[in-house]
Image: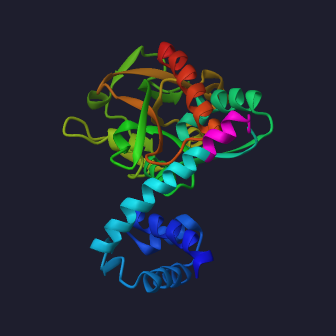
Amino acid sequence: MKSNVDHQLRLFIEIAGCKSLSAAAEALSLTQSGLSRQLASLEEHIGQPLFVRHGRGVLLTEAGKKLLEATNSAYQLVDNTITQLRNQHGVTDGSVHVATIHTLSYYFMAEVVAKFMAQRPSANVALLGRSSPGVVELVESGKAEIGFVYDSAVASDQLEITPLFEEEMCLVVHESSQYASRPSVDLRADAPPLVVFPPSYALRRMLHSKDFDATVTAEVETVDAMLQLVSLTNGQCVLPALIPARLLQEYRLVRVNIDYPIMKRRIVGVTRRGRPVSSMTALMMEIARESASKAGARS
């Protein structure tokens, strides 16, 4: 049994953090039944239950709280020491998973990842495009070491937040649109029907408020699909003003400033609180901060 205790304690810490066997099993890429067996074995070894099961997940018992307090700090110390040793010896290979909202892939993340790869050519970068809740979930679960998202989507005490820059939205229309030659539009007064993202996306939620409620003509899940549909239907959509003009030109689209409502959002970087930050993750965040100062100047 002793040879398995360390492994089972790691699993126990993950279950406590997720507050759910199913969520912990998913984060660890294990089956729920296999994780349950490991937990039962640890509880048998200790001689008392560590969790109380309920309909929505699990709660720590008094024994579980005592064990978590001891093991969590101990393993954090071990993990931090390993990370420091790797950093001191210049270990720069391996992989880093980066979660990002879709829109940032078109004007921010490409520059960040390119600069990172230039400095860490032996590293492998996996860029995971998601909706705002999806980015938060990936970082919380440990499936991504770092994420880039709108601050309004981050309501989690499990994440460390690094503010980056603020961006403003614009109206994107076909070059033959009645709005294309106008310097700006009032969305409430003009009420143009919009191609939008699904309700779970932060940008979609910006289009529905007590002062303005957008008229929706179609829903799509990607920026490419949105641009193509707007181009083919001579329609309209709302996207960040930092979307490159060259990309819009491919679809014969142009940007128009929005007078009302003013829609601005702050982009932030997020990492998992309480977990050691590797040298590669720290470098990615540093590069993001440098690129953010340029993006903020252009906005």
Q: Is residue 98 visible?
A: no
Camera-side residue: 272 or 196? 272
Residue at 52%, 22% (x, y): give it.
Answer: 292
Q: Is residue 107 left or right of residue 40?
A: right
Camera-side residue of 235 and 98: 98
**Where in the figure is residue 186, as x and y percent of width and height?**
31, 24
Residue 221 to residue 31: above or below: above
Q: Is residue 137 magenta?
A: no
Residue 40 is situated, as x and y percent measured from the top left of the image, at 46, 84
Q: Is residue 170 above or below residue 222?
A: above
The one nearer the camera, 280 or 200, is 280
In the picture, measured across the screen, residue 289 lies left or right of residue 122, that is left
**Relative vertical location of residue 91 with respect to residue 220 in this rendering, above or below:** above
Residue 285 lies in quadrant: top right
Q: Residue at x 76, y 42 (%)?
A: 93
Q: Quadrant of residue 80?
A: top right
Q: Is residue 90 magenta?
A: yes
Task: Single out the residue that lies furthest toward the right.
Answer: 122
Segment tinted magenta in the rendering: 82-91
Q: Is residue 59 visible?
A: yes
Main secondary structure along the magenta-highlighted residues: helix
Give residue 139's position: percent from left, percent from top: 50, 50
